Image: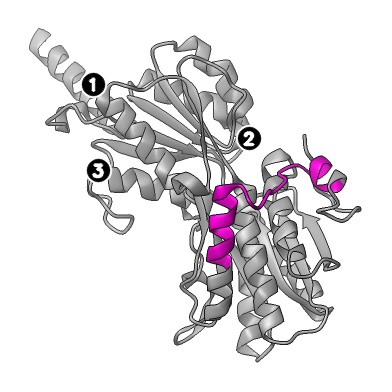
Amino acid sequence: MKKLLVFVLVLAVSFSLFAAGVTESAKTDDTPTLRLLTDATGIDDKSFNAAAWRGIVSFYGDTVANPSKRGVYYDVVTAQTQDMYIPNLKQAADEGYDIIMVTGFTFADALSEVAPLYPDQNFVIVDVDWVGQPNVLEFIYSEEQGSYLVGLAAALQAQAEGIANPRFGFIGGVPGSTITKFEMGYVQGLRAVYPNASIVDYYANDWGKPELAKATAKTWYDSGVYAIFSAAGGTGNGTIAQAKEYRLQGKNVWAIGVDSDQYEDGIYASGKSAVLTSMLKKVENSSLYALNAAKDGTFKGEVVKMGLADDGVGYSDVNSELKAEVKAKVDAAKADIISGKIKIYGTYKDALAAGAAPAGLAALDD
């Protein structure tokens, strides 16, 4: 009877380790383990979360297409609603991961509550610099720098095509200081070419409703908007979908991707993509930074800011229809931003005060 009880207990423990996603018995070295926690859009958002996941799998020598070590060293849990953030954080901490990583400022309150309860647990959060716990590594980005580049690229492309008085659009997810940096950089890039550019914006108040962006994009494109930049997570995929439909019909409209290079998402014919360029927010580098710090024993609570100078942000130039002279001018602007010759404002308040952005936009600094 006693042997049977021991056998049952062993089975129970084995099952719990398997269910946890990372099985310590399968590990053969001291490689750090990590659980990624995302919002409802998950790692298939083709944007922000996808970039974080890409960095994680690459650290372990895997690829997104073949995450062979998932369940041994790393895994991911998606929360369908925000009320699952705290339970998911606590569960991951109880299961003994070396690092728990969360993506986006919507996790900030939950992490601020949970992190002090697990002082020996390493946490990572991206897009937040106010948690301020000794066990939380926080990453922020100079999104306004990369967004300036894609705004500049769109405006220069319109200019090269001889379009008179082009109009431009911006679609955001949930309004707040982080997304404002995207919009402000984009606007300043546009206005560097067209000082009086007509700009419309819209906030969906959601990261996972592409139908909202698609409907808005259709209305704007129909009214003559040339290019739309979406910083809205999965919601922004609707902009790309609408741009694909219209370019397939021969209409000269563009979508601008965000976070990851979304060129392939915009493909509508052989060698043709509706995504002119993408603002690259290299969240994968945050994943790698955290995992290497854990491996080296240097992990600590701090705020790390990543910009153009350290390859934290950038733009994609893979679309062959992005004109060579446009790329040359954008690359020159990149160098000028790094040197400080070009100053970019990341808040709406500062951009308005400097005359770098028009009044009446829906951007929020808080």
Q: CA distance from mark 2 to mark 3?
A: 27 Å
Q: Is residue 35 left or right of residue 230?
A: left
Across and down, in percent, residue 168 comes to 77, 69
Residue extending furthest toward the top: 2
Q: Quadrant of the C terminus?
A: top right
* Res 258 label: none
Q: Which residue is mark 1?
A: 13
Marks 2,3: beta carbons within 8 A: no
Q: Earlier in the sequence, mark 2 or mark 3?
A: 3
Q: CA distance from mark 2 to mark 1?
A: 34 Å
Q: Which residue is mark 3?
A: 60
The vertical placement of 7 against 269, above or below, is above
Label 2 crowd bin: few (<14), some (14–19), many (20+), radius 10 Å: some
Q: Is residue 12 visible?
A: yes
Q: Residue at x 58, y 19 (%)?
A: 112
The magenta region covers: 330-352
Q: CA distance from mark 1 to mark 3?
A: 26 Å
| Magenta span contains residue 42 | no
Quarter-of-image position of residue 5: top left
Q: Which residue is mark 2?
A: 106
| Magenta span contains residue 335 | yes
Amino acid at the residue labelled 1: Val
Across and down, in percent, residue 93 comes to 41, 20
Amino acid at the residue labelled 2: Thr
Q: Secondary structure at mark 1?
A: helix
Secondary structure mostly seen in the magenta stretch? helix
Q: Quadrant of the N terminus?
A: top left
